[in-house]
Image (cartoon, grey):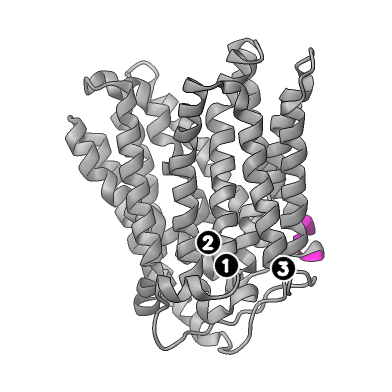
Amino acid sequence: MYSLLLVIIYIAFISLGLPDSLVGSAWPVMHRDLQVPVSYMGIITMLISGGTILSSLFADRLTRKFGTGLVTAVSVFLTAAALFGFSVSDSFLLLCIWAVPYGLGAGAVDASLNNYVALHYASRHMSWLHCFWGVGCSVSPYIMSYALTGRSDWGMGFRIVSVIQIVLTALLFLSLPLWRKAAAAAPQTTLPAQTDDPGTASSGETASAKPLTIRRMLRMKGVPLVLATFWAYCALESTTGIWASSYLVQHRGIDAETAAMFASLFYLGITFGRFLSGFVADRLGDRRLIRIGILTVLAGAALVLLPLPIHFPALAGLIVIGLGCAPIYPSIIHSTPANFGAENSQAIIGVQMASAYLGSTFMPPLFGLLAAHVSIGLYPAYLLLFGGLMLFTQKRLYADR
């Protein structure tokens, strides 16, 4: 039963990644067709992020009331409807309207599924599931490219992904009895394996009488530290990916084609790194994987910073940062029940997701202001700042554990 459900969750994680890179890959054509400035993509992404943050914060209440399976199915349906809405939109205002359910669906399913896997499956599955998210995120630009070839019809790209999401929605609704059986079969008092112990997570899940409020969570020992870690991680990951090419071209004098290739290898490093970390996750434990990942990120950022006349260290540094990023996000998520209790994990993971989106939404534009008014050469120092913050918060988090 758990194996079959795991297959469905793997498929769901691919689906989670599919919409994430669609808007960016289509926008060069979309903004011309809609006759709006290219900068308006920032408005769309902010609306999507706002919906994602909101639904992440309410994921605990929704999951307690309706269960993970139903929340996941309805959330994927919301995303599918929003994608279809994008495909038929002929004005920027309509895109803004459809961006709201686009984000609402993404946040709830992300928080609910991550918590379910953290409670019921071993650390290796969390790494591999996030690897599958990377697969989905990598595939969608190819879908959009196929749709744009010859016809320049970005709406077709959104419709294709919408149909994929609708098929997944049907699969999730058909699997609801399986979710209920799994919930009924799960012990009610056990917790996942400790983050530094080998072995698999238990299938336990408990629920407190009332949902945790944000104020209560922030008063819990260690929660502000893990939120700061998540915020810093997503700020670093997003800034690295968005500004890598510009830094290499403008500050290092590397040609645009080479810069674009190595910027894409950063994301490949994350995906491949999560695939590899799955093989050692249960042996090393979440805490060690997080520490190794952060130190690897710092090493990669230091390579980018080195003022050498040759470009290879900086280019290699981007790949190293990607490999370092790989285990951090899934390991922090998977360690949440062990750190704060299974009865609190859904609420805390929801707030972690909200914190993550705050980092990925606002910190890359902040670096854009620094690049414009100071120097784009600050790029590696900016990354080192977030890497150092992660190292500090993680040491503080586990100091008394």
Q: Nearer the viewer, mark 2 or mark 1?
A: 1
Q: Residues within 10 Å of mark 1 (few under 14, many from 20)?
A: many
- Residue, x 74% and y 69% (percent of image)? 399
Q: Where residue 154 sits: x, y (%)?
A: 32, 27
Which element carries disc 2, helix, strand or loop? helix
Q: Which of marks 2 and 3 is nearer the N terminus?
A: 2
Q: Does 282 appear in magenta?
A: yes
Q: In this view, does 126 lie to the left or right of 35?
A: right
- Residue, x 65% and y 10% (percent of image)? 253
Which of the labelled discs sits on residue 398, or is there none?
Answer: 3
- In the rendered view, tell whether residue 91 sits above or below residue 280: above
Residue to which mark 2 is pinned: 9
Q: What stretch is highlighted in magenta?
A: 279-283
Which element carries disc 3, helix, strand or loop? loop
Q: Does 72 appear in magenta?
A: no
- Residue kind at label 3, given as amino acid type: Tyr
- In the rendered view, tell whether residue 152 sits above or below residue 392: above
Tag 2–tag 1 contact (CB < 8 Å): yes
Location of the C terminus (image quadrant): bottom right
Q: Can residue 15 be seen in this view?
A: no
Q: Which of marks 1 and 3 is in front?
A: 3
Tag 1–tag 3 contact (CB < 8 Å): no
How far apart are the two marked residues, 2 and 1, measured between alpha carbons?
9 Å
Which of the labelled discs sits on residue 117, or is there none?
Answer: 1
- Residue kind at label 2, given as amino acid type: Ile
